[in-house]
Amino acid sequence: MILIDSLFTSTYFSIVMKKSKSFFGEIKENFPSGLVVFLVALPLCLGIALASGAPPLSGIISGIVGGLVIGTISNSNISVSGPAAGLTAIVLTAITDLGAFELFLCAGIIAGLIQLVLGFVRAGSISNYFPNNVIEGMLAAIGIIIILKQIPHALGFDKDYEGHESIFDSGLNFDYFTELFGAIHPGAVVVTLVSVGILLAWDHILILKRIKMLPGALVAVVAGILLNEAFKMSGSSLAIGTSHLVSLPVPQSIDDFKNLITMPDFNGFTNPKVWIAGATIAIVASIETLLCIEASDRLDTQRRITDTNLELKAQGIGNLVSSLIGGLPMTSVVVRSSANANAGATSKVSAMIHGFLLLVCVLSIPFLLNLIPLATLAAVLLLVGYKLAKPATFKHFWHLGKFQFIPFVATVVAIVATDLLKGVGIGLAISVFYILQGNMKRAYYLSREKLDDADGISIKLAEEVSFLNKAAIKKTLKNIKPNSTVIIDATTTSYIATDVLEMIQDFANIRAKEEDINVQLMGFKTSYRDYETDEDSHVIITHKRAM
């Protein structure tokens, strides 16, 4: 009996140690990316709070909750949550109408409860119906917006708040450009150029790339601080003033710390305006989150699939907690998620680290953070924007044919010209129009055994498969257990949409190898002609394990 107890204790201890090593290994691996996201999120949180007419720290609280609470619950490995620019107009209008931020916090609580309900009724599945060209168009548009909005900060012209994502409603006209070029700050330009140089060196010099625990963004930020302090000490005209630096509130006493948290006025639940604001926030935040999750999964190098219903539940809990302690409502945010992916994040631990750093640094060293020039943070975001909107992406969709390229470009232009939701809606409408034009009579058939008990699964594709069939195939592939045998039969299929081909490719080449799934592919071609055009969609699926 003693021997059995000893073996049990030894086994349990061994399991605990393995899990501990795995967790600490993830922290070590994801700390650099978490640090980069923290540096990007800090001014965004403050800027969005300022634009929303809320207390400055409410944005930081939202970022902390987005990292620690949502990051813990969500199973998304790349996305990062926090206050969103897409909610700014809604929040500002609601606070103005209600007359008090404490009343508005009740609307945040209502939004969180509605999102929880949406998660339980499985409303997250609508994200499966966003085609890849629209999602990629959204990412490219966000990249262009980041570049356009960060160029002024890089030049030392900080008219717009950090995180402002609209181009044309801020007076982007001849007078704006005249004012911009007349207000260029030489010191900010120097800091920007030095920061960009450091970031490019960290991206392209192999020795520097291998220093995982010292990300280029941190080196750039430290260099920016030291440069500006040197300018100040020498009395140079290049010195950057406080208006061009990060601006955090610095608590001076215990009472100041107590005042950091604003509690909701629960009398707001009797106000119909609060309920309308809460429902509006819930709908807009949920749609933006689902769009970002789909985009984040595309940025994930391992192509892992996020449970969108769990994500809605996580967002609901996050908004509840944030509103109860004086934070802004939040969504999953493309800018932070993109920075996270580009910095090499491999798991959701990165988002949690960013939330932890926000909490610790804001409470302990706000005076040090207030030395960071906005120009050096603009340099980080400029490179993030370029990677999202790089010319290779446009070239890729051009080669896929007009039925892929036109919705992609339309989404890009519409988002840059209007906003995220309108732009995605326009791109989706154009994509659906083209699909339905040649797909009205196409059927889709999926033949399989019950996945719960089956070791062998057979998926037979119909003669023509469009992205409208993506959701069913995606759900089936997601539910396939490790060590299974899967036959995907395309012998009678004459057309498969690029979205579906890429999804099958990711499953066969990445997940199947990781989970020891034996994939047998039958009848797949190296190219499929795109509807009535002369363009071919090329996706070659290479993985096939022997029995």
Image: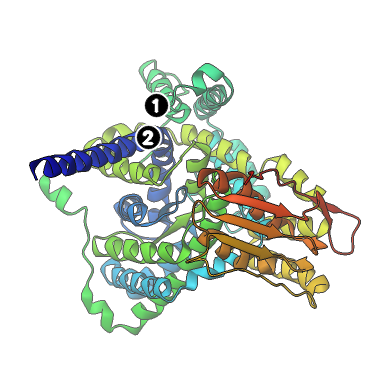
Task: Answer with left or right where residue 389 lies relative to residue 220.
Answer: right
Q: What residue is drawn where x is 51% and y is 23%?
A: 209
The picture quadrant where one finds residue 248 is top left
> Are the residues at dot 2 and dot 1 in contact (C-beta closer than 8 Å)?
yes
| Residue type at tag 1 | Met
Element at label 1: loop
Q: Can residue 87 be seen in this view?
A: yes
- Total numbered labels: 2
Image position, residue 285 (x, y; %): 46, 66
* Residue 213: mark: 1
Task: Answer with left or right where residue 183 lies relative to residue 222.
Answer: right
Of mark 2 and mark 1, the one earlier in the sequence is 2
The picture quadrant where one finds residue 310 is bottom left
Image position, residue 86 (x, y; %): 50, 61
Q: Can residue 179 be seen in this view?
A: no
Q: What residue is drawn where x is 35% and y is 34%?
A: 25
Depicted 112 relative to depicted 160: above or below: below
Residue highlighted by disc 2: 31
Element at label 2: helix
Depicted 216 relative to depicted 60: above or below: above
